[in-house]
Amino acid sequence: DAGVTQSPTHLIKTRGQQVTLRCSPKSGHDTVSWYQQALGQGPQFIFQYYEEEERQRGNFPDRFSGHQFPNYSSELNVNALLLGDSALYLCASSSYRTAYSGNTIYFGEGSWLTVV
Amino acid sequence: GNSVTQMEGPVTLSEEAFLTINCTYTATGYPSLFWYVQYPGEGLQLLLKATKADDKGSNKGFEATYRKETTSFHLEKGSVQVSDSAVYFCAGMDSNYQLIWGAGTKLIIKP
């Protein structure tokens, strides 16, 4: 049973470019959340998708957008990249019904984005 | 709003030493609290959790007790090993069932 898979694992982009990161949730999970983790800091919640809709959003600008597909996989898109967007982007999957318990949240290994 | 504060690292200990990593939280009500661990090059893994006051979470020799009176959830281990070297994150769950994270504490264990 595969856990949460993310791609790519590392990428380098130039300021002003756009990037798309991908996540496949753990089998049986229907909810995907995205987090940004800057070096030396804790993760910051970006948004959460369930039933192909954005359900919750953290304090991130509209340059950050996402999508969830019928198979529950998800994409995170960042437009007009800034140097400050350099970070580890983590995907977390869970079951919407049991998200409250916390112990059904599984994280991928993340996508390292460097903006130069 | 809710917030989680944990001690800054790095924390450097010798093998078999006693470990404490402090974590305090500010929240409305009494949220579920968690410790996650991030080993080098890996994603976040749930280490332990507590869902109400006086609960004690434990796993792999680590323990943390949910102290309502001090709003704390300190992580402890009686005898650390080199393999425990990692970054440890304290987190609380807000009313929207999202995790609020501390900044992380890097733990270095020397043989």
Image (cartoon, rainbow, N blue to C red):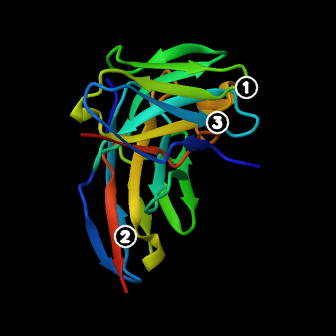
Image mark 1: chain = A
Secondary structure, mark 1, is loop
Image location (x, y in percent) of residue A37: 36, 41
Disc 1 and disc 3 on one polypeptide chain: yes
Disc 2 and disc 3 on one polypeptide chain: no
Task: Give, as a three-letter code, the residue at label 3.
Answer: Ser
Task: Give, as a three-letter code, the residue at label 2.
Answer: Leu
User: Does residue B57 sit above or below A58 in this rendering?
Assistant: below
User: Can you identify the residue that label 2 sits on?
Assistant: B19
| Quarter of the N terminus of chain B within the rendering | top left
Task: Give, as a three-letter code, the residue at label 1.
Answer: Asn
The label shown at residue A83 is: none
User: Can you identify the residue that label 3 sits on?
Assistant: A24
Give me the C-alpha separation between circle 2 and circle 3.
36 Å
Image location (x, y in percent) of residue A90: 47, 40
Image mark 2: chain = B
Image location (x, y in percent) of residue B89: 40, 50
The label shown at residue A71 is: 1
Question: Residue extending furthest bottom?
Answer: B111
Give me the C-alpha separation between circle 1 and circle 2.
43 Å
Q: Nearer the viewer, residue A105 or A101?
A: A105
Q: Is residue B103 left or right of residue B63?
A: left
Say few, some or many: other residues with alpha carbon within 10 Å of mark 1 (under 14 / 14 to 19 / 20 or more): few
Secondary structure, mark 2, is strand
